Structure formats: C-alpha cells, structure tokens
Amino acid sequence: MRRREFVTFLGGAAVAWPVPLRAQEAGKSYRVAYLTLAGGQDAVIVKQRLIELGYSEGKNLIFDDRSAEGQLERLPQLAAESAATNPDVIVAGFGTETAKAAQAASTTIPIVFTSAGDPIGAGIVKSLNRPGANITGLTSQTAEISGKRLQILEQVSPGIRIIAVIVSPGYPFTTVALPQLRTAAEARGQRLEICEVRTADQLPASVEAAVKAGATGLTILETPVLHSLRRQIADLAAKLRLFAIYTSRDFVDAGGLMSYGTDRRQQYRRAAELVDKILKGQKPADIPVEQPTTFELVINLKTAKTLGIDVPLNLLATANEVIE
C-alpha cells in the first residue's frame, strides 16, 4: 500500500524534474543505441518513454539494445559496436562502467547515462552543472545516502554494530563509495565486514564469513552484477537472518527486507526525456547532470514477519510503500 512521500532535500531546495517535452517532429528518423552491462528493465522503460513522447519504432525510431550479460570485459567491444552504427544518441544503462565504456567509444556521439553513483569522482563529467564534452545524464547519489541506510538499520535493530557489505571489487563506483561508507559507519560506531563478490558462487561463503565475524546486518554497494544477483542475495540474507537494507526496491520485490534509494523507474523515464532534448538539438555539454531530490523507502513486511523482525511503527509510517 502506498504511504506518504518520503522526501529528502539535497543541497537546499528540491528542484522538480521538468515536464515531458512535446513529441519529435514527423519526417525524421533517429537511431538510439542502448548499452547495458546486465540486461534489465531500464532499456524497456527508456524505450516506452520515448514512445510516449511521440517516437515510433519502425517509423521515426531505431532502438538498438546491447547487453554484456554481466561480463564487464565485453563492454568495450559492445560500446564500439554501438558507436559504429553512428547513432544519434548512445544511452548508457545503469552503472558507472557503462558510461565510461560509451565515453571511450566516442568523443562526438551524444551520450546519456541513466544512473551513475558518483559521476564526478569516477571522472565521467567535470561538474554536474557543466558536464562538458559529449555526455550528460543522471546521478543516483548512492554513495552519499549510504549513511542513511545505516541509520535505518539501527532503527530496526538498535545497537547493531557489525554490518556485512557486499561489494564488487574493481568497479569505479565501489572504489569511490566504499571509503564514504566506512566514514559513515565509523561516525555511528559501526564496523563493516566487506564481502567481495565477483561471481554468484562467491556470494554464500563471503557473507557467511561476515556472519561468523559477528555481522548481524547487511547492505550493498550496488553494481549491475550485484543487481542481477538480487534474488540470491535476498534469499541468503533471509537464510542467515540478517537485518538487510538495499539500494533499490528491486531487491525488496525479490524478497529483501528494506530498500532506501532513488526511484529508478523515474530516472529511466527522465533519461529518455534527456535523449529527446538532444534529438531536438541541445548539446549534452549544456545539459546539467540531474540529481534526485526524493528517495523512497520500501519495506517488505511479509519478509519481516517471516524473520520475526518487528519494524518500528514510526519507520512504517514514513515508508513510501509497505509490502504485506
């Protein structure tokens, strides 16, 4: 059931995303190349939003969708193949690595990234207001709100002190976000047990080791690969009876306990609107990278009851959605 909106303002007053632009004029055809590390719903949502804006596949829109199927080493080749089709825009799907691969493939084709945790820290853009070069997009600000997730965990489990953190080593976002999460944990008197996961078979042993070290909570630094393992991660957290909080509601839909983060569906829709702006003549360098101003808290009460977890009423009252 839907609850009242849970809003967080960053850096002052919130700025609403503009209303959708009118449809592209008839008579022209545009090619949009979609590049993703791990296939998911993001490409579907972006294409659907473009259709809502007046584009029609087979008439004035060619939509190429390429996925590396979770294999990071395939991204450069797929990005090069996308650029070789000479698209009007390349859309880099969820994750910092996809945006960087698209950048490496072309310095002239406009690029829109759908969700990057820290685009400045990862070297994707020079600044949010003036991204420069041929790229713009949206940031999920995942690193900055990791501390909030630790706070929510402590509300559900007062006194929680050791938290397992599942990470994908070697990813740009992990490199930037992990030190920030450590700082946030130290400020709360908490300790992190790092669980490095490169492949699905590494998941159980890494998290079980953290539990043996005393971890009673769990969170993640999400990458496309970890997103593809969301059901396995949620199942393992339940098996080990961990208080878990994730970065997006996709984990809660997969059976996870809670999530706190941006509304990814809205971000993908907004990315399509940025594509529309570019197709209408705007330059990516002149389009500011957009930051979310609202975050959603989703709680799976069914999972909580199964685990025997009593979610505080005041936390339930602030949730955007409670799954029962």
Image (cartoon, rainbow, N blue to C red):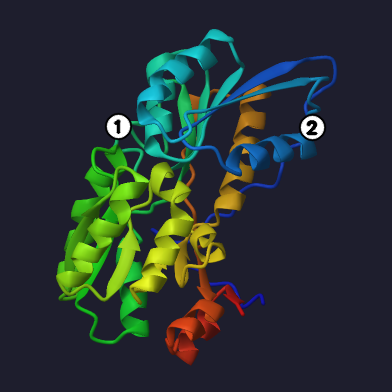
What numbered label is drawn on residue 123?
1
**Which SS class for mark 1?**
loop
Tell me where residue 57 sits by quadrant.
top right
Amino acid type at circle 2 is Ala
Asked whether 294 or 213 is in front, the reply is 213
Residue 322, image x, y percentages: 58, 77
| Residue 31, placed above or below residue 247 | above
Asked whether 261 or 311 is in front, the reply is 311
Is 323 displayed left or right of 179 in the figure?
Answer: right
Measuring 49% from the left and 36% from the top, which residue is drawn there? 137
Asked whether 234 or 23 is in front, the reply is 234
Q: Is residue 128 visible?
A: no
Task: Specify the quadrant that holds the C terminus.
Answer: bottom right
Measuring 67% from the left and 18% from the top, which residue is drawn there? 31
User: Mark 2 sits on what residue?
Assistant: 23
Tell me where residue 9 sits by quadrant.
bottom left
Few, some or many C-alpha atoms within 10 Å of disc 1 (few <14, some 14-19, many ≥20)? Answer: few
Measuring 24% from the left and 69% from the top, which residue is drawn there? 163
**Which SS class for mark 2?**
loop
Earlier-in-chain disc, 2 versus 1: 2
Task: Specify the quadrant that holds the N terminus.
Answer: bottom right
Residue 211, image x, y percentages: 22, 70
Measuring 48% from the left and 33% from the top, which residue is drawn there? 69
Is 145 displayed left or right of 275 in the figure?
Answer: left
Residue 44, image x, y percentages: 66, 39
Amino acid type at circle 1 is Gly
Residue 290, image x, y percentages: 49, 44
| Residue 48, placed above or below residue 98 | below
Is 306 displayed left or right of 161 in the figure?
Answer: right
